[in-house]
Image (tube, helix red, strand yellow):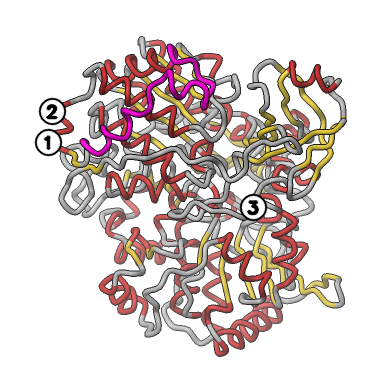
Amino acid sequence: MNIEYVPNTCPYCGCGCGMNIISVNGEIEGVEPWKRHPMNEGKLCPKGNFAYQFVSRDDRLKTPLIKENGEFREASWDEALDLIASKLKEYREEDPDLLAFLASARCTNEENYSLQKFARAVIGTQNIDHCARLCHGPSVAGLAQTFGSGAMTNSIIDIEEASCIFIIGSNTAEQHPLIWRRVLRAKSKGAKLIVADPRITPTAKQADIYLPFKPGTDIPLLNAMMNVIIEEGLEDKDFIEKRTKGFEELKEVVKKYKPEDVEELTLTPADKIREAARVYAEADSAAILFAMGITQHITGTDNVISTANLAMLTGNIGKPGAGVNPLRGQNNVQGACDMGALPAFYPGYQKVIDEEATEKMTCAWGCSDLKCTPGLTVVEMMNAAEKGELKAMYIMGENPMVSDPDIQHVKESLESLEFLVVQDIFMTETAELADVVLPAAAWAEKDGTYTSTERRVQYIRKAVEAPGDAREDWDIICDLAKRMGAEGFDFNSPAEIFEEIREVTPQYAGMNPERLSKPEGLHWPCPDESHPGTPILHTEQFATPDGLGIFFPIEHKDPAEVPDEEYPFILTTGRVLFHYHTGSMTRRSETLDRELPTGFFEINDEDASELGIRSGDMVKVRTRRGEIEITARVTPDIMKGVLFIPFHFAECAANMLTSSSELDPAAKMPELKVSAASIEK
């Protein structure tokens, strides 16, 4: 019997927990926490503990599939890739922008880098995006405007050094359990916990100060806190004077947002706002943690800017236990952004509108037709496909038929395409619509790097072979590029791709195999091989051109939809402890699926009583996009007038109800967290 323990990184949320994959005679049998790993220190959450169960499922994709007359048939790699290459050549010759590509927050840095390079250097389009658009696009946009860098400012370990932690738009206990462990450690040392949420989540139940607020009113709540801080002279005057600009403009706007004036709008008691503002401002070090609860709005970028304003106002930037910390929802969503899987950025957040950056990438990749115009975002791709302005898409490891807003619209858009390729490990709801499906290797079956929410770059290592003819994503892309006559894709391993990443991505330049092989990896930016990495950003100056943080005063704007007589409830969506994203992995893990086999919706007990609804009743939830049938869960732990649905379940898909009609103007984020809804027993 041959037993192996292979160090790896969890394939689920952005925490980046270390684990050992246990294989017996070449078959994956389990995982064990990596006790030497500094992030999780020998602990795993339920998802991590059972991360191995989906890998060896019988329904893994094992051979390429081509659809003929509405049915899939098995094909060889040569036949499938030759077909794809010929189709992509046809569209490229007609107009490269008839093609679009979706990369994946679940694939490695090397694979995301390869796909965005393929889209740009081989096809000649900037139409490359991924699911960060629908989670932390506003974090990148908002923090880049204020701080000059759109990433988590502090490390996860750093959180436990905070004397105050303010969580807004995140149910950290369920979404990021190992980050939550750091929060609890801080509390045990005396830190005060403030939680703002429409629901009394497991996170909120641990709060010292709980701020209930109506979905879509983040800005007045944050402005009211800043109003109190300035009114009572609690701002950090020295930090503001030396390290920021725009304070007077901020002061003029927030003076209109007294807690007593915003209480009717936010439904947050004014005395609680005042208490939270004082505790946050008077703390020696205060950390803000947020997730999609504040980003998935048409004001998502403004919401993020407001958190930055609050942190700079109190001097809580550039020191341990402080900062503004967006918690990434997926294992490599930070890395996919870093790698340039975004229509407006090359690797390292070098702007495509910058002619020098475009010239740099043109030289690095040996191509001649890169455009200085940003491409389409994922929502814009769907709109263009529906109109016939986009003819073909290549989707790697994404499942927009569950994850994207207004699923009926997504389905119509994908069916309007002339040619769709999906590369994945299972036959997902999106893969079912494809013309060609390519079988990919799963996380335990390949080498490469992930970058966690704290900018920690670390290795994943191959533990077992992929099933059947499944191949690693980078290998598929490189093979396809060579079939299309492209040069620059003669990579033999992820390590060779990473060497090229280092050359073109300034933040990764100092990372090499020897340094990354250690359990702690490296935090970017790491500009040279003598640099220790950067756990805390902006310690002496911001990443803006003049080194100063910029206050941007933000006014409240109503959500795209507000409740009315026909749709009297506010529907919001989110995650649960046992499932991940579209459920294609966790719902194939028998232990996790047994814990929660299908979806539900939460409704306040008073609302339920008025409607005659009891827990367990099957109810129709309806919005202007469509309706679903779903089981009721009656609870006092949600605000009156608000409904909550987790988005993991295709059979009662929350995103059948959400809207993509209006977008955040900066980040192109649709409003997934506020939809006007009605319910019917």
Most foreground residue, 10 or 168: 168
Residue 194 drawn above or below residue 537: above
Of the numbered discs in the image, which one, if any, rests on residue 404?
Answer: 3
Disc 2 to disc 3, C-alpha distance: 44 Å
Of residues 558 and 331, which is closer to you in this image?
558
Tell me the kind of residue under disc 1: Lys
Q: Which portion, as a residue range, is magenta?
A: 247-272
Prevailing secondary structure class for the magenta stretch in the rendered image? helix
Q: Considering only vertical position in the picture, is 359 above or below 340? A: below
Q: Earlier in the sequence, mark 3 or mark 1?
A: 1
Is mark 1 in CB contact (under 8 Å) with mark 2?
yes
Disc 1 to disc 2, C-alpha distance: 6 Å
The reply to whether dot 2 and dot 3 touch (C-beta < 8 Å) is no
Q: Quarter of the image holding residue 420?
A: bottom right
Tell me residue 614's x, y (percent): 84, 20
Residue 259 on the magenta segment? yes
User: Do we see residue 517 in this rendering?
Assistant: no
Q: Which residue is mark 1?
A: 242
Classify residue 171 by image quadrant. Answer: top right
Residue at 78% over, 31% down: 594
| Sooner in the amino-acid sequence: mark 2 or mark 3 | 2
Answer with left or right where residue 481 lies relative to residue 276: right
**Amino acid of disc 2:** Asp
Q: Classify residue 606 by image quadrant.
A: top right
- Residue 479 location, x and y as percent? 55, 76
SS assignment at label 1: helix
Point out residue 287 in the picture as x, y percentages from the top left corner: 35, 27
Question: To which residue does mark 2 refer?
Answer: 238
Q: Gap between marks 3 and 1, in whole Å? A: 43 Å
Crowd around label 2: few <14 · some 14–19 · many ≥20 (10 Å): few
- Disc 2 vs disc 3: which is toward the camera? 2
In terms of depth relative to the viewer, which is nearer, 87 or 74?
87
